[in-house]
Amino acid sequence: GVQMTYAELEREATATARRLAARGARRGATVAVMLPAGLEYVVLLHALTKLGAVAVPLDPAAPSVETDRMLEAVAPRLVVRSMADLPEAPKGAQPPMGDAFETESVQCLIHTSGTAGKPSAVELTYGNHLWSAIGAGVRIGVAPTARWLCCMPLHHIGGLSIVLRSALYRIPIVLSPFDPAGVA
């Protein structure tokens, strides 16, 4: 029931990047994201990208013993479980931000399912996401009137990639919990 334009996303992501920087987030620092899927998650993800920080999306509903093990393995500089965790940025704070990063730079750490043992963190670069978006555009097409349904968890590569490639193409997304009848 909430809508946001890309211009509004830009403003919110910039403001959130300043708040993240006040908590020590910066280029290359890992930041665990444990928010429920929604607009705040999308804003936070784009704010981390502005700083060049490495997002570590984790399932906020996972048992704490599981997330504790993942957090210990990646040792994030910051864990965001709620936007209330982030203080207001100091007046005049201008952390280094940008929208252009080397394709080889790590954008996020996604955990595997752990079917062959414990979940492992896999590095995905800006280039991985860029080429995935290009591949999706070639494979399924991108029309100016398109909208992408995102009913996958945002801590999963499927949901995360929809959020990232939609911004690259400036295509609206619809975030919705998975409902078989609604998706059909």
Image (cartoon, rainbow, N blue to C red):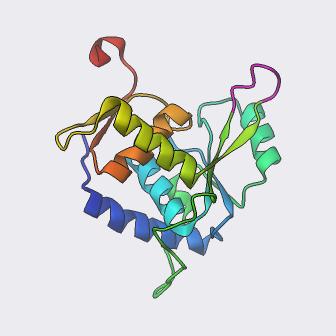
Q: Where is residue 102 in the image (x, y as percent from the top left)?
A: 58, 64
* Nearest the eye: 176 or 141: 141
- Furthest toward the front, the residue is 138
Q: In the drawing, does residue 129 fall left or right of residue 73?
A: left
Q: Tag count in the figure? A: 0
Task: Establish if 135 lies above or below 44.
Answer: above
Q: Position of residue 174 (x, y in %)?
A: 30, 36
- Quadrant of the frame with the N terminus: top left
Q: In the drawing, does residue 3 fall left or right of residue 119?
A: left
Q: In the drawing, does residue 111 fall left or right of residue 161?
A: right
Figure quadrant of residue 48: bottom right
Q: Main secondary structure of the magenta part?
A: loop
Q: Is residue 114 magenta?
A: yes
* Nearest the eye: 117 or 176: 117
Q: Give the range drawn in magenta.
A: 112-118
Q: Does the magenta stretch include residue 175?
A: no
* Nearest the eye: 180 or 161: 161
